[in-house]
Image: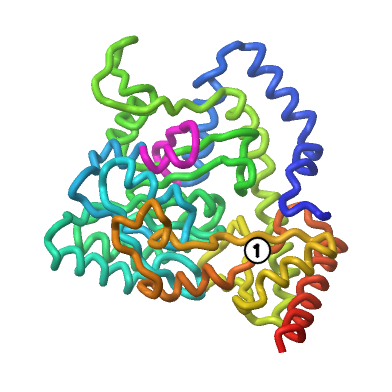
Amino acid sequence: MIPFIDLKKQYESLKPAIDEALIKAASSVRFILGPEVQELEKVLAEYVGVRECVACANGTDALALPLLAWDVGPGEAVFCPTFTFFATAEAVALRGATPVFVDVNPVTYNIDPAGLEEKILEVKREGVLRPRAVIPVDLFGLPHDYESVARIADEHGLVVLEDAAQGFGGCYGGRRAGSLGQVGATSFFPAKPLGCYGDGGAVFTDNSDLAEIIRSSRVHGTGGRRYEHVRLGLNSRLDTLQAAVLLVKFEAFPRELEARQVVADRYERALLPAHPHIPAVPGGLRSSWAQYTVRVPETRRQRIMELMREDGVPTMIYYPKCLHLQPVFAYLGGRPGQLPAAEKASREVLSLPMHPWLEPADQDLVVRSFLEALEKSGDEAE
């Protein structure tokens, strides 16, 4: 079985530098928020193009901390796409606010601006919730429609919290993912484009006052003195060992992004003539290619996966059930058919192996296996 994401090969390529960085961090015995964390925050802020970066324990907290700093809470609506990982809406609900789910663009899978405006107006007409924020997601590595979302948010007085957990390294025009909102959040989960060896996350913003609140909130709302607490917060500090790993991996990150693009280009050349339902990257955007996601007929998807597994080729489904249909959000009254583009995507998407170390021979196997499975599953369905 070829790896879906080959983290072992990445480690082997960086092993001397990573081992040295881990030993140095361990020897310092400053295991939490050590100097490597401050160094990481500095280099990441410069890379994203913002004044402030606040590292934290994981990507979910990177979403929760800005909501906490803004005091988002009960009676307020936060708009987010329904086709995304659960944490996007979970962070909202944990604050007592109400996630309002929006359909997605069927080509990019990102939040649909027209659908966003429609939902904002609907919430305003109902008069029960106060529209407060929007969380656009850079799904599969592709930045969201920044200009359209920013315009709508400005018109309706909403703050924008960009979920760049998958999009880190991607670009919209001349702006990098993480800077496409008042605040950006990312994850360093190992499988992400820039991942650590455990959990980790970061918040990005140009608002230094807000960053100071988030720094306080990530350590139980501490004030200027030890054991003085000026607000309620979280325990969301980044381990020094994880920062040490990330500093090494960040040096290789630009090369890995280029390698991901090479893999994506090879997929496009091999698949497009026979199967046009492959990822599209609109002009002016650059994907970080966190995933390479194609679409297949829903009635044949499971059989395609089975046939590819027999060839030693792994596949994944991100995400098989939209958030408005998740049992935990049943209280919001979500029903099948409400957000059709997202629901259709959830039934048809299929992600193929994607990582910077995917060798051409292995990628040829993936392509051959996929196209043969697609054809065979069609013959079986007839």
Residue 98 in view: yes
Residue 273 in view: no
The structure residue drawn at horizontal position 65% and vertical position 82%, both measured from the top left corner, is: 276
Which quadrant of the figure has residue 347?
bottom right
The structure residue drawn at horizontal position 32% and vertical position 46%, both measured from the top left corner, is: 93
**Total of numbered circles in the picture?**
1
Q: Residue most toward the bottom?
A: 382
The structure residue drawn at horizontal position 63% and vertical position 74%, both measured from the top left corner, is: 278
Residue 16 place in picture, x, y as percent: 79, 29
Circle 1: element type = strand
Specify few, some or many for label 1: CA neighbours under 10 Å numbering under 14, 14-19, or 20 or more: some
Q: Nearer the viewer, residue 381 or 287?
A: 381
Which quadrant of the figure has residue 259?
bottom right
The structure residue drawn at horizontal position 60% and vertical position 47%, both measured from the top left corner, is: 192
Looking at the image, residue 87 sits to the left or right of residue 94; the answer is: right
Residue 325 place in picture, x, y as percent: 41, 62
On screen, residue 240 above or below 331? above
Position of the N terminus, as image quadrant, is bottom right
Question: Is residue 297 found inside the magenta-colored segment of the image?
Answer: no
Q: Which residue is mark 1?
A: 351
Residue 360 place in picture, x, y as percent: 84, 63
